[in-house]
Amino acid sequence: MNRSAFFWLGIGWVGFAFLPWYGFSTARNSAWPPTGLSAALGEAPWLLPLALALALPLPFLALQSPRAGRVLLVAGAAGLAWLIAQGLAIGLRGWSWTWLADLAVPLEKGQRGMGLGALAVAAAFLFFLTIGLASGGAMKGDRFTTGAIGLVVAAISVFVFWPVSIVLVQAGVADPGESALAAFVARLTARDIWSLNCVMATGRCGVFWNSITMATLAGLLTTLLGLAFALVATRTGFRFKTGLRLLTVLPIITPPFVIGLAVILLFGRNGTITLLLADQFGLTATRYIYGLPGILLTQTLAFTPIAFLVLIGVVQGIAPAMEEAAQTLRASRWQTFRHVTWPLMRPGLANAFLVGFIESLADFGNPLVMGGGYEVLSTKIFFAVVGAQNDPGRAAALSIVLLCLCVGAFLVQRLWVGKKSYTTVGGKGFAGTPAALPRGLKIAAYSIALPWAAFTFVLYGLILFGGFVENWGRNNSLTLKHYITAFGLEWGDHGLVWAGRAWNSLFTTLEIAAASAPLTAGIGLLTAYLLVRQRFVGQSAFEFMTMLSFAIPGTVIGVSYILAFNTPPVELTGTAVILVICFVFRNMPVSIRAGVAAMSQIDKSLDECALTLGASSAQTVRTVILPLLRPAVVAALVYSFVRAITSVSAVIFLVSARHDMATSYIVGRVEVGDFGLAIAYASALIVLMGLGILLIQGLVGERRIARRDVAAAPLKPAEVPA
């Protein structure tokens, strides 16, 4: 305990005495921010109690007093409380609330947002608290687990709960003379949310029913397709598995509005296929693709790869020995799949459906492009925030409805999976071959996966083609001008010049994605470990906290970050840090669900063996669990890297002139009708993300828990061991 405590004590004092306490000003020639110590002795005496809290544990640790744990607990709790209180109470112009100004001494000047020094001190106080709790017996004295829980709870509280709560409070903001409760009830019970007098195909009904219909269908379709692709890729002898995997991942590396644009150019009223059908069969060209059919088509294209990434690790993790045992007992292939394989896939199927359901609810790009008159919650929230309504209270009420829908899906998933054991990876190796699929199921998997793969291939071929033509559908003469405009290179007086318009946003996007992907995967898999491997008070509430950011649309996340981090105590708007933080906590739930699905199959006795042999929890995670989680690590890294590049809804509010993102640049091109440049940029992103995915898979590698895979040739009779 003393070693860990001294380490964090040193971090705290370095942050307080040597690092800048306040963030840098965005103005030119701004002075270097003072340290916490210099500010406490000068313009900010309210920081002095933090120094006392940092000094309090020192004599007890130096003397190795048995009371050191309790002193650390007190110092950490008191220091964190004072740090938060002074940050909220004192703003740029002095006291943040008028009632404080009436009670306290007037302040001549306030304070800016906290900086690196404050972050180091906050981390020190947080781990003082967790070390003190562990020394008192929390989590059986495991400092790693206690610290991990504290870190995740603190991060989610600051970067999810705090900004979202600021938006949700707006649901109760009332007009003069109106009570807050009446305003909240009126917004929450609006007729356009709950109306049942509707025709579902036209979208003339409550957005709640539209949204739940859309999300349920999207969740089912993406799970079905993801399972079909996972079975073909892992349980058949299909020769072109590499190409099939590439096609399943292509939609996830494409900005969603690009898929919608391609679908419109194919199936819209003047689309290529629509006009071809009209000429060949005399069919009237209509707007049939808009509404629920178009939204489902684009969302299924966009979200099937997520289901595939979750399910492929689950299918690979089923031990062949269990299927061989069933066949030894004369079970048929169909009986083996129905009674052994299928039940063991239930956690993965439930997680894949949950992710698809929530992704569909939170998606606003596809419904915005393809919705027509079909209104859903995400688009309603968007127009309530940025449209002519300018009604943040209504947006907050709609966000509450959306959050309740996502929580309901989470509870249904928990009930369906239940508390049964799905462990298949134990401490013993095995050399079995996975059972072959029943003939009917194999044909069904091929019939579902291959036509969808062919459609995806055609769609992306047309998208790539659109970047090389003057004007798709009107002037199809070939040209390179769109790529030259975006990514042109020239030789200047001082060497190579990045003359293309898109280089700045591309470099910024790659830097942000490279920074956010490992953080997202690390925090997500650590959270999954806590959920699956540990038992502690408030675990259900903890799991709900981790899914909250996934349940809120990106539009609301973007607006909430602007409101929360534009003023003290934390000022991040206009910086690259706010983009990284947004991506980490927006995409973290997928990493969690992938980790939970994969970790549910790993026998807990492996952890116990390592702990029995003297390994710490951190060593057990690093050397035993993490190598078995490679499919989940790949899924987490790929998803977070790609979504950091393709995200639109949240980023559109957070980008700045200095930190522009690729998607916001493409949206700007689409708004002015420059579709060729937009498609060319999107095509370049697809190629770059494909290379990034290959790099991630090469660095992480594959999990190997068997000596032969499904493609291995069967043994000849003479080779069968006696």
Image (cartoon, rainbow, N blue to C red):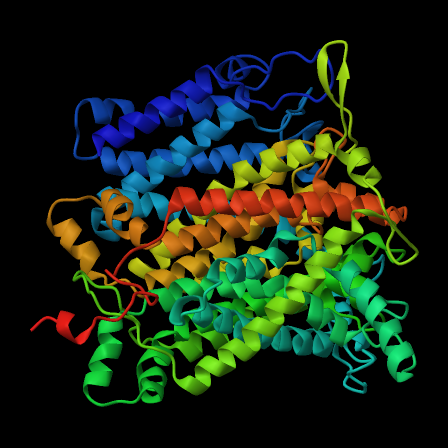
The total of numbered circles placed on residues is 0
Q: Of residues 185 and 627, which is closer to you in this image?
A: 627
Would residue 407 appear left or right of 290 to someone viewing this image?
Answer: left
Q: Is residue 455 above or below residue 554?
A: below
Q: Of residues 221 and 80, which is closer to you in this image?
A: 221
Residue sitting at the far left? 722
Q: Residue 482 at what x, y percent from top left?
A: 82, 40
The answer to whether residue 2 shows anywhere in this view is: yes
Quadrant of the rendered image containing residue 607 = bottom left
Quarter containing the N terminus: top left
Q: Of residues 230 and 366, which is closer to you in this image?
A: 230
Q: Residue 560 at what x, y percent from top left?
A: 68, 48
Q: Is residue 15 above or below residue 211?
A: above
At a point 84% along the width and 58% down the height, the residue shown is 175
At a point 81% along the width and 73% down the height, the residue shown is 289
Q: Residue 69 at what x, y percent from top left?
A: 24, 37
Q: Of residues 619 and 689, which is closer to you in this image?
A: 689
Quadrant of the rendered image containing residue 376 = bottom right
At a point 73% along the width and 67% down the height, the residue shown is 377
At a point 11% along the width and 48% down the height, the residue shown is 613
Q: Is residue 33 above or below residue 399?
A: above
Would residue 328 appear left or right of 421 to someone viewing this image?
Answer: left
The answer to whether residue 57 shows anywhere in this view is: no
Quarter containing the C terminus: bottom left
Q: Residue 284 at what x, y percent from top left?
A: 92, 81
Quadrant of the rendered image containing residue 628 = bottom left
